[in-house]
Image: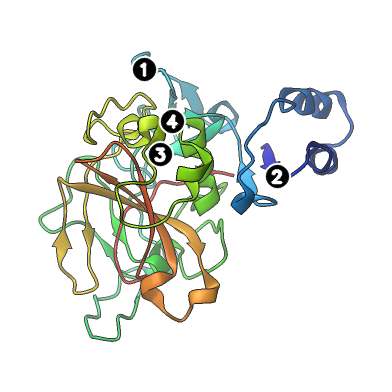
């Protein structure tokens, strides 16, 4: 497993990598390979960013779709029970990050069976997860309230519902993915519902065939699975794809409507929205290899 610590100086990066990997020939090779790292996202300085290629996942076998030029697909014998849609091309490697190619589907162990949805004006997240109304639908997986996707934990990059060796990606790990696919720094850090920001690189179009001008050149293959609202109303299937991160803004707690970061891909937009949801919303998740 290779964990890359993003720092403000190359000297700090080399020091930390030497501590992680040791001063052996393998570590030196890794350091040399990372000499050209230019991601200078100040908001993610000193954050841990996982960069482990899918080739290092036990049971993964390359089965690349050459039409997805920005990503490499892998079969994975560990997919059953974790990733909807089976073992064939279950993983996608983009910029040395290994992601689930399809949505997670398993019940979190701390919320199994899933509790009943608790609709009231206090907007309490009870750890519900389940399928969009009328589902399950092909390859769409489950929708999770935030405590469900985190399996009861609150720390960033928690394993959550993901299998051992995987975790719920952080806001900065999503920004790293977006940077890999061509989004500039200003747009990476933009936050809100506006369609003005986060347009550069057409990242939404690269992540999904169903975004505006969608080509899915990354192979991420996001489907428009919609979400469940705080009022327990299913919305936007066929219009948006929404994914939780494991990052929350603790400064804004206990205001859950403003605290939990997510991503939104929209069928009328070429970009990817970055904004915060109430923890009681239920959305999809893609796990990231440690």
Q: Residues within 10 Å of mark 4 (few under 14, many from 20)?
A: many
Which residue shows up at 25% across the image and 80% down it?
118
Which residue shows up at 50% across the image and 28% down it?
60
Which residue shows up at 44% across the image and 25% down it?
74
Q: Earlier in the sequence, mark 2 or mark 4?
A: 2
Which residue shows up at 24% across the image and 36% down it?
211
Whole-percent x, y for residue 265 in the image: 29, 44
Q: Quadrant of the N terminus?
A: top right
Q: Earlier in the sequence, mark 4 or mark 3?
A: 3
Q: Which residue is mark 1?
A: 65
Is residue 167 in sight in this rendering?
Answer: no
Mark 4 vs mark 3, foreground winner is 4
Q: Earlier in the sequence, mark 3 or mark 2?
A: 2
Q: Quadrant of residue 4?
A: top right
Whole-percent x, y for residue 209 in the image: 24, 30
Q: Residues within 10 Å of mark 2 (few under 14, many from 20)?
A: many
Q: Which residue is mark 2?
A: 5
Mark 2 vs mark 4, foreground winner is 2
Q: Quadrant of the C terminus?
A: top right
Q: Which residue is mark 3?
A: 79
Looking at the picture, tell me which residue is in the foreground, 167 or 68: 68
Marks 2 and 1 sit apart, C-alpha to C-alpha, by 30 Å
Considering the numbered disc 3 on the image, is that residue within a helix, a strand or a loop? loop
Q: Which residue is mark 4?
A: 92
Q: Residues within 10 Å of mark 1 (few under 14, many from 20)?
A: few
Looking at the picture, tell me which residue is in the foreground, 240 or 101: 240
Marks 3 and 2 sit apart, C-alpha to C-alpha, by 28 Å
Number of marks present in the image shown = 4
Marks 1 and 3 sit apart, C-alpha to C-alpha, by 18 Å
């Amino acid at each position: 497993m290779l964990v890359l610590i993003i720092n403000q100086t190359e000297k700090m990066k080399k020091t930390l990598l030497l501590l992680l990997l040791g001063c052996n020939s393998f570590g030196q090779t890794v350091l040399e390979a990372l000499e050209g790292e230019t991601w200078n996202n100040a908001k993610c300085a000193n954050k841990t960013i996982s960069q482990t290629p899918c080739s290092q996942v036990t049971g993964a076998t390359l089965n690349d779709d050459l039409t997805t030029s920005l990503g490499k697909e892998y079969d994975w014998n560990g997919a059953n029970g974790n990733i909807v849609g089976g073992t064939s091309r279950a993983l996608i490697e983009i910029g040395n990050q290994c992601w689930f190619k399809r949505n997670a589907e398993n019940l979190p162990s701390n919320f199994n069976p899933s509790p009943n949805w608790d609709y009231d004006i206090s907007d309490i997240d009870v750890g519900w997860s389940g399928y969009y109304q009328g589902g399950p639908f092909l390859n769409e997986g489950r929708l999770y309230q935030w405590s469900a996707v985190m399996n009861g934990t609150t720390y960033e990059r928690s394993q959550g519902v993901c299998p051992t060796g995987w975790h719920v990606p952080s806001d900065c790990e999503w920004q790293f993915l977006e940077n890999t696919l061509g989004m500039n720094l200003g747009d990476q850090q933009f936050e809100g519902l506006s369609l003005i920001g986060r347009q550069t690189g057409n990242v939404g179009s690269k992540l999904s065939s169903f975004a505006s001008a969608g080509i899915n050149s990354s192979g991420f293959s996001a489907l428009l699975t919609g979400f469940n609202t705080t009022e327990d109303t299913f919305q936007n299937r066929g219009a948006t794809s929404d994914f939780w991160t494991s990052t929350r803004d603790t400064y804004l707690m206990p205001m859950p409507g403003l605290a939990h970061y997510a991503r939104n891909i929209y069928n009328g937009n070429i970009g990817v929205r970055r904004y915060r949801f109430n923890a009681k919303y239920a959305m999809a998740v893609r796990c990231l290899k440690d």
